[in-house]
Amino acid sequence: MSVNKTSAQYPDLPWSGVTVGRFLPLIPEDFPDPQSITELCQYLFGFPEHKVYLFHPFGNPVPDVLRQAEDTNDIVMSLFERPYYRHRAGSERTFTQIPEASQDGVEYVRIKLKLSEARRRAMEIQAHLQTAEASESDSPVILRPALWGIGIDLRNLWTRIKKWWAK
C-alpha cells in the first residue's frame, strides 16, 4: 500500500492582506432607527480598539439613519473598500475580498465606521461629569485640606438638618 505524502496546497492567488484583531461586521438591517446609532456610538466609545465595518451592497444608498449620523458629525465613514462577497451561503456576516471576475453574486462595499472626535470628546465630558456626580459624598464632613485638616460642607449640612427636621 502506498501513501501519498503530498500536503494540501493553496492556489497561487495574491494576498491583499490579513486583518488581525477584534472587529464588528454590520449590515444595513442593523440600523432600523436612531437608537441603533446611539448604541453604535456607545460601542465605539467603549471599545475604541475594535474595528467596525458596514458591509453594504454595492450601488445601494447607505441607510438614512447612518447618513444623518455622519451629517451631524457623530459617525465618520472613513474607508470604502471593494469587492467583498458573502463567504458562504447562509452566512449573514462573513464576507471575503475576492477579485471581481472570480465570483458571482451580490458585491458588497466594506465601509469603516469610526466615532468622530467631536462626539468622542462630548462623550468623555459626559462620562467625567457622571463620575464626578457619583463620587460626591452625602456626608457634610470634608476630608480635604482645610483648617485643622477637616472641613464641613455647610450647604450639605443645612440640607440634612432640614430633611431631619421635616421627619
Image (spheres, grey):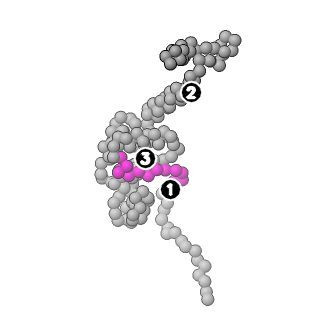
- Residue type of the residue flagged with mark 1: Gly
Residue 108, given in percent of the width and then of the height, sits at 36, 55
Residue 97 visible (yes or no): no
Measuring 43% from the left and 49% from the top, which residue is drawn there? 53
Q: In percent of the image, x 33 and y 39: which residue is there?
A: 68
Q: How far apart are marks 3 and 1 (CA)?
A: 16 Å
**Mark in front: 2 vs 3:** 2
Of callouts 2 and 3, the N-terminal one = 3
Q: Amino acid under label 2?
A: Ser
Q: Does the magenta stretch include residue 25?
A: yes
User: Residue at left 40%, top 58%?
Assistant: 92
Q: Is residue 121 above or below residue 35?
A: above
- Residue drawn at (48%, 47%), measured in percent from left and top? 51
**Disc 3 on helix, strand or loop?**
strand
- Give the side of residue 134 with respect to residue 103, left or right: right
The residue singled out by tag 2 in the image is 135
Mark 2 residue element: helix
Tell me the quarter of the image containing the N terminus: bottom right
Answer yes or no: is residue 22 visible: yes
Q: Label 3 sits on what residue type?
A: Lys
Circle 3 residues within 10 Å: few <14, some 14–19, many ≥20: some
Dot 1: few (<14), some (14–19), or many (≥20) neighbours within 10 Å? Answer: few
Residue pointed to by mark 1: 17
Measured as percent of width and height from the top left, residue 96 is found at 44, 59
Q: Name the residue under label 3.
A: 112
**Residue range highlighted in magenta:** 17-31
